[in-house]
Image (cartoon, rainbow, N blue to C red):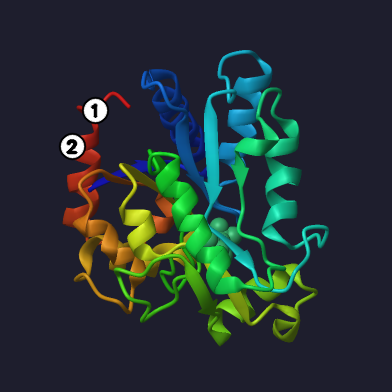
């Protein structure tokens, strides 16, 4: 695992956007590049920079297929807190050459949630698997909506949200946890770790415990993000604030080895 420590959120975002852009440009296979994407505050800076590159003609999305991580169950696309809405508002609508048919987001209004999730897995397979999965994590270490005690080999499915997550996410629902949907559709931990590369963004004091558990704790279903330890090409891009609970030797180790890396 690589842990790339940047001074602040802006630098973390720039680093991650440059990494993703380099991967898309380097893709030479005769199938599109397949990119997994998250919502939340963590990726907003990355989206801004990817949009800037795209509008400046530095990066094309014409040959990119995307799959989003998750979606609330029961929210229509037009709801301003649906992840469909978030992704279009913060990213897709601003890209010059993203093809709408290449965008995949789980349907939160489906009448057949299990079938929808099975189809999603099938579409990922048909696209050739995910080349790079970008993600964020929750304060309890959830990856996508894989809450504590979700199997580390889980596939795309329906998830019950914990009270903790509903409280944290209530900031987008007028501060009322009851207004946060109780369930979501989410890719599984196994779906994420099947990706060829994983890039997770972790920023801010409130994620410090989750970062320490992800990197230094044992692999455990309590901290589903710890499954990253078993992946051969996982990168965490984080800021200084998120490093507050790492031990000094871990912190120094990652700073040290990153000095010799280019990107
Ligand atoms: C939600 C999403 C996660 C996301 C997490 C963190 O719960 N389902 O995919 O990683 O929030 O969000 P933020 O980046 O806003 O802290």
Q: Along the line of sight, which residue is nearer the eye, 259 or 62? A: 62
Q: Which mark is residue 257?
A: 2
Task: Tell me residue 45's x, y (percent).
Answer: 59, 40
Q: Is residue 197 left or right of 66 when viewed as pictured?
A: left
- Ligand 1 lies under 8 Å from the Cβ of mark 2: no
> What residue is shown at x 53% (from left), y 30% (from top)?
64
Q: Which mark is residue 32?
A: none
- Rendered image quadrant of residue 192: bottom left
Task: Tell me residue 139's x, y (percent).
Answer: 47, 70
Q: Residue furthest right?
A: 78
Q: Along the line of sight, which residue is nearer the eye, 204 or 15? A: 15
- Does dot 1 land on a helix, a strand or a loop? loop
Q: Along the line of sight, which residue is nearer the eye, 81 or 263? A: 81
> What residue is shown at x 18% (from left), y 37% (from top)?
257
Q: What whole-number distance in Å separates the C-alpha atoms at marks 1 and 2? A: 7 Å
Question: Image height check: is 175 above or below 122?
Answer: below
Q: Is residue 245 left or right of 20 when viewed as pictured?
A: left
Q: How crowded is mark 1: few (under 14 residues within 10 Å), some or many (20 or more)?
A: few
Number of marks in the rendered image:
2
- Does dot 2 land on a helix, a strand or a loop? helix
Quadrant location of the C terminus? top left
- Rendered image quadrant of residue 57: top right
Task: Tell me residue 181's x, y (percent).
Answer: 68, 78
Where's ligand 1: which quadrant?
bottom right
Q: How crowded is mark 2: few (under 14 residues within 10 Å), some or many (20 or more)?
A: few
Q: Are marks 1 and 2 in contact (CB under 8 Å)?
A: yes
Tell me if I can see residue 237 in this picture.
no
Q: Along the line of sight, which residue is nearer the eye, 125 or 140? A: 125
> What residue is shown at x 45% (from left), y 64% (from top)?
207
Q: Look at mark 1 in the image and give the residue it sits on.
A: 261
Question: Image height check: is 54 above or below 72?
Answer: above
- Rendered image quadrant of residue 171: bottom right
């Amino acid at each position: 695992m690589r842990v790339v420590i940047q001074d602040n959120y802006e630098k973390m975002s720039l680093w991650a956007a440059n990494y993703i852009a380099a991967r898309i440009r380097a893709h030479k296979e005769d199938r599109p590049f397949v990119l997994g994407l998250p919502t939340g505050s963590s990726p907003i800076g990355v989206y801004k920079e990817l949009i800037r590159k795209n509008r400046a003609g530095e990066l094309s999305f014409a040959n990119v297929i995307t799959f989003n991580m998750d979606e609330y169950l029961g929210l229509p696309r037009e709801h301003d807190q649906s992840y469909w809405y978030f992704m279009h508002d913060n990213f897709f609508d601003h890209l010059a050459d993203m093809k709408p048919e290449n965008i995949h987001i789980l349907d939160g209004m489906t009448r057949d949630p299990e079938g929808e999730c099975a189809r999603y897995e099938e579409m990922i397979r048909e696209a050739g698997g995910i080349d790079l999965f970008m993600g964020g994590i929750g304060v309890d270490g959830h990856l996508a909506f894989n809450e504590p005690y979700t199997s580390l080999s889980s596939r795309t499915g329906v998830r019950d949200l914990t009270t903790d997550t509903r409280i944290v996410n209530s900031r987008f629902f007028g501060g009322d946890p009851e207004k946060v949907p109780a369930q979501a559709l989410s890719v599984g931990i196994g779906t994420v770790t099947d990706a060829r590369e994983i890039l997770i963004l972790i920023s801010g004091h409130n994620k410090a415990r989750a970062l320490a558990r992800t990197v230094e704790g044992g692999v455990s279903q309590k901290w589903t993000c710890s499954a990253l330890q078993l992946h051969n090409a996982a990168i965490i891009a984080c800021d200084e604030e998120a490093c507050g609970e790492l031990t000094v030797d871990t912190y120094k180790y990652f700073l040290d080895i990153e000095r010799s890396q280019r990107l």
